[in-house]
Amino acid sequence: MNLPNSLTLLRLGITVFFVASLTLVYPWHATVALALFLLATLTDYLDGEIARRKNLITDFGKLMDPLADKVLTASAFICLIPLIPNGALPAWTVIIIISREFLITGLRLLASSKGIILPAEKLGKHKTAWQMAAIIFFLVQLSVGEFFPDSPSTFSTIWSYGGSGFVTITVALTIFSGLAYFWKNRSLLTEE
């Protein structure tokens, strides 16, 4: 197994510890979760960069890299729903985000059954970047709350408007990139 693929698998392992840190209550758990998420995001950047520069792109990487991203982001969004105040991360937005990921994964599996590997598209990478930025925004807010527990009202405006802005852009890109991906690969959906 080459280095980029090992980094992809490492990201899946980090996701387990990230979820544990975000859901278990202990001192500085949100800050630990933030650090783990940033580390997982770094592995995402590094595996793609190394694979392209060293020409180590494999079918395993084309399939597992986006899947590892989906597991990480879906886990983060699900875990964040009950932790984010003021309804800045409504459950319905997370359902849209995760539904899109399941549908794209299903399309990739269908393509794979026909001997075709569908790599991630540029628009999908932008969507993933915005999803990760939104998650980091919320994790930073939770981490800041650990450092300044007596001043939650100071951050309420940031939570509401900043969080809503990130979520709006993320959901819009999620829907648009999903529709574009299906349109580009619509021939896979026709019976032959």
Image: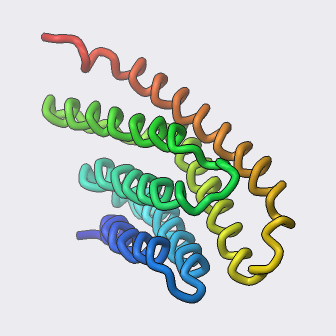
Seen in the picture, residue 92 relative to 176 is either above or below; the reply is below
- Which residue is at 34% across, 67% downward? 12
In the displayed structure, does residue 41 sit left or right of residue 101? right
In the displayed structure, does residue 162 sit left or right of residue 65? right
Seen in the picture, residue 113 relative to 190 is either above or below; the reply is below
Q: Quadrant of residue 50?
A: bottom left
Residue 62 vs residue 33, the one in the foreground: 33
Seen in the picture, residue 150 relative to 63 is either above or below; the reply is below
Q: Quadrant of residue 8?
A: bottom left
In the displayed structure, does residue 179 sit left or right of residue 169? left
- Which residue is at 34% across, 60% downward? 56
Q: State which quarter of the image contains the N terminus.
A: bottom left
x then y, percent, for residue 42: 53, 69
- Which residue is at 31% across, 68% downward? 9
x then y, percent, for residue 48: 45, 58
- Which residue is at 26% across, 38% downward? 117
Residue 69 vs residue 170, the one in the foreground: 170
Q: State which quarter of the image contains the C terminus.
A: top left
Residue 139 vs residue 11, the one in the foreground: 139
x then y, percent, for residue 103: 33, 33
Its colouring scheme is rainbow
Seen in the picture, residue 101 relative to 152 is either above or below; the reply is above
x then y, percent, for residue 26: 51, 86
The total of numbered circles placed on residues is: 0
